[in-house]
Image (cartoon, grey):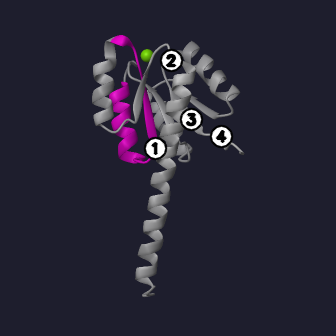
Amino acid sequence: MIKIPAKVLIVDDEKDFVEMFSLRLQEAGQKVFAAYNGKEGLEMLDAHPDIDVVVLDIKMPGMDGIETLQEIKKKHPIVEVILLTGHGTIETAVHGMKLGAYDYVLKPADIEDFKSKLEAARKRKEEQEERIRRAEQKAMIRKSGEVY
Ligand SMILES: [Mg+2]
């Protein structure tokens, strides 16, 4: 089976973590983008709207993960978000999931655990895109007056 790389954006203020995590994901065959704060993350998404999954740190100076998540969901509702949390912020992660995040991983993230969540998140996005495509096709058929 040919594996198409997922496009993953990591948004985290900890540069060491971003570098290490990017490397691991690249080794696993994924295409990785990085940003070091919420604003940069949003700009990156605007520039690369084909990004599949955002890995988003909750604790960041300035715009925190929850605020960033809300902005992401407003502008890019189909992009899946996996939150990065410490033990102290699991409740915030739960809140984030109610706001549309797909799931969360605890830091330091276990890469195997993360990879399975990443695949699942990406699959959900692909399925949603497929549903939208089918709905669009139906809408077009209706518009053109064709009956089938
Ligand atoms: Mg942080």
Relative to 5, say whether 10 is above or below: above
- Foreground: disc 4 or disc 3: 4
Query: What amino acid type should be assigned to the residue bearing mark 3?
Result: Val
Q: Secondary structure at mark 4?
A: loop
Classify the position of ligand 1 by quadrant: top left, top right, bottom left or bottom right: top left
Mark 4 or 1, closer to the camera: 4
Amino acid type of the residue that numbered disc 1 sits on in the rendered structure: Val
Q: x, y percentage for residue 103?
A: 40, 31
Q: Are marks 4 and 2 in contact (CB under 8 Å)?
A: no
Whole-angstrom CA distance, mark 4 to mark 2, is: 20 Å
Disc 3 marks which residue?
A: 8
Q: Residue at x 49, y 13 (%)?
A: 108
- Gap in Å between the C-alphas at discs 4 and 1? 15 Å
- Total marks in image: 4
Who's the residue at 48% across and 39% down the image?
121
Residue marked by disc 4: 5
Q: Quadrant of the N terminus?
A: top right
